[in-house]
Amino acid sequence: MTTSLVFAGLVLSPIFGALLIVVLALNNARRAQILALLSLAISLGAAAAGIEACRDGGVLSYSYAGWTAPIGIEARLDGIAAALAMLIAALATGVCLYAGRSLRAELPRDIPAFYAMSLLLVAALQGMTTTADLFNLYVFLEISSLSAYALIAIGGGAASLASFRYLLIGTVGASFYLLGVAFLFALTGSLNAHEIATILQRTPPSAALNAGLALLTVGLGLKMAVFPMHGWLPDAYTYAPSATSALIGGVMTKVSALALLRVLYAVFAPGQAELLPAVTTVLGILGAAGIVFGSVMALAQRDLKRLLAYSSIAHLGYIAVGISLGNATALAGAVFHMLAHGLAKATLFLVAGGVVYRFGRRNLDSLAGLHRTMPLSTAAFVVASLSMIGIPPTAGFFSKWYLMIGCLEAGRTDLFVLVVASTLLSAWYFLRLFEAIFFVEPPKPRTRDELPTAMLLPVGAAAAAILALGLGNQFAIGELIEPTPLLQALGQLVAR
């Protein structure tokens, strides 16, 4: 597959799919689902081709409409971006397959619109993942946000209020990011990330440069939901339709985290901004606080989806800590945790949606006897939970392992101890769920009533992917993540 077809498949295919749904299937949910799945199949194939092309440090570059940077907009795909692009395409495909029955149970109306908005979200996230232009990233950031607001709001009631709160906070984040881009453009005259980095190497430190760094970090931190900028996340994940929770909970914050990683270490390389050490230090502190806050709040929840939402805040804290450390091992762990957490959290939300589908409730009491009623879904839930805790051979174990090694390489034994201790907190609240599933008897005896095949297939595939990613961690980290030019440059910098 040529480079142009890879980028077209990742970004343009979902956009055209959304347009086709609006034209041909806005009143036909089944047709909309088929169009969405066909579009995502193309995106999935493009992501697979991108992974093959980006192994061992390969990079794909494409200039839209033939206009090269800095005048034109450049798209770049390296191993990290390819891995995240595959996660986005795969989870979106699974969610759209799962959504047919789930949405009919939760949303008797507006179902075709869900597929169109999901495709726009996927296109925007793929655009953010692959763009090398900071303003183009802002455009995709806004498209992804608008799509997410709509996907949450279609739940009605409390979901509409959660979406409005997300809109307000998201608008502030986008404004901070855009102001940061404006400062960099004023200093460098360019919007291309790689050209900006080159110009900054010969630009003396200044207040404008520090202001640009601070604004970009805060803007992306809000989008990533780094503590204490997480206010939009719990309600959005809790009250959104289950399919929406799985999609945005699995991938959306991870793309903003990748953008933050690139800004800190590809645009503002170490030594190019006086404020960078302070920013990474604060990011590490907030990440550590988020790990504790999210874990403790998860322990206090009785609503399954809300528990999973607060758990996400804790795991975003792990990613923030990895980014803050700045060495190649920690960053590899942070990226791998994006993948591991994305798969695990999507699986958990899909099973939570299955519980709502079967019993119409999502409190912990509804899990009683689940292993008898939905044994296959329960098995997937257990695999995802073990990955969240960090038990081998799941993917979550290896991501935490790299993060802990990165902490030791940076001389941060305090963060190492925190990651270990927080794993015990994760085990605590997931053991509460296991207790309800395996040891609490439901008020009325339940017979086996597994999810329909269209819902069970994505759940099982996601759980299998968690194990496959864990067992294949050497491929993901050794052949895709670590050989990327960014991590190679950081490794050489530390070696010197």
Image: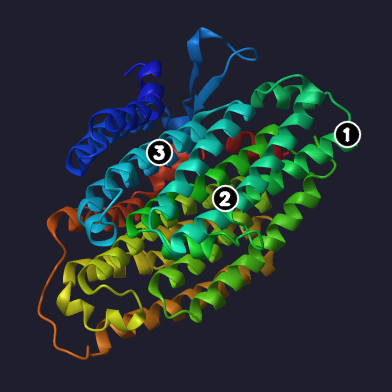
The colour scheme is: rainbow
Q: Which residue does the numbered mark 3 point to in the structure image?
A: 122
Total numbered labels: 3
Horizontally, residue 119 falls left or right of residue 221, namely left
Tell me the kind of residue under disc 1: Pro
Name the residue: 36% across, 37% down.
119
Up-down relation of residue 83 to residue 350 (above or below): above
Residue at the image position 22 percent from the left and 88 percent from the top: 442
Q: What whole-number distance in Å separates the C-alpha atoms at marks 1 and 3?
A: 38 Å
- For disc 1, the marked residue is 205
Q: Amino acid at mark 2?
A: Leu
Instruction: Name the front one of labels 1 and 3.
Output: 3
SS for tag 1? loop
The residue labelled by disc 2 is 167
Q: Earlier in the sequence, mark 2 or mark 1?
A: 2
Locate the N terminus and report the quarter of the image it occupies. Answer: top left
Q: Residue 325: image x %, image y %? A: 67, 53
Callout 3 amino acid: Val
Mark in front: 2 vs 1: 2
**Label drawn at residue 325:** none
Q: CA distance from mark 2 to mark 1?
A: 35 Å
Local crowd size for mark 2, using a 10 Å CA cut-off: few (<14), some (14–19), many (≥20): some
Q: Is residue 281 left or right of residue 321?
A: right
Residue 333 x %, y %: 53, 52
Choose the circle earlier in sequence order: 1 or 3.
Answer: 3
Image coordinates of residue 121 in percent, x first then y, are 43, 40
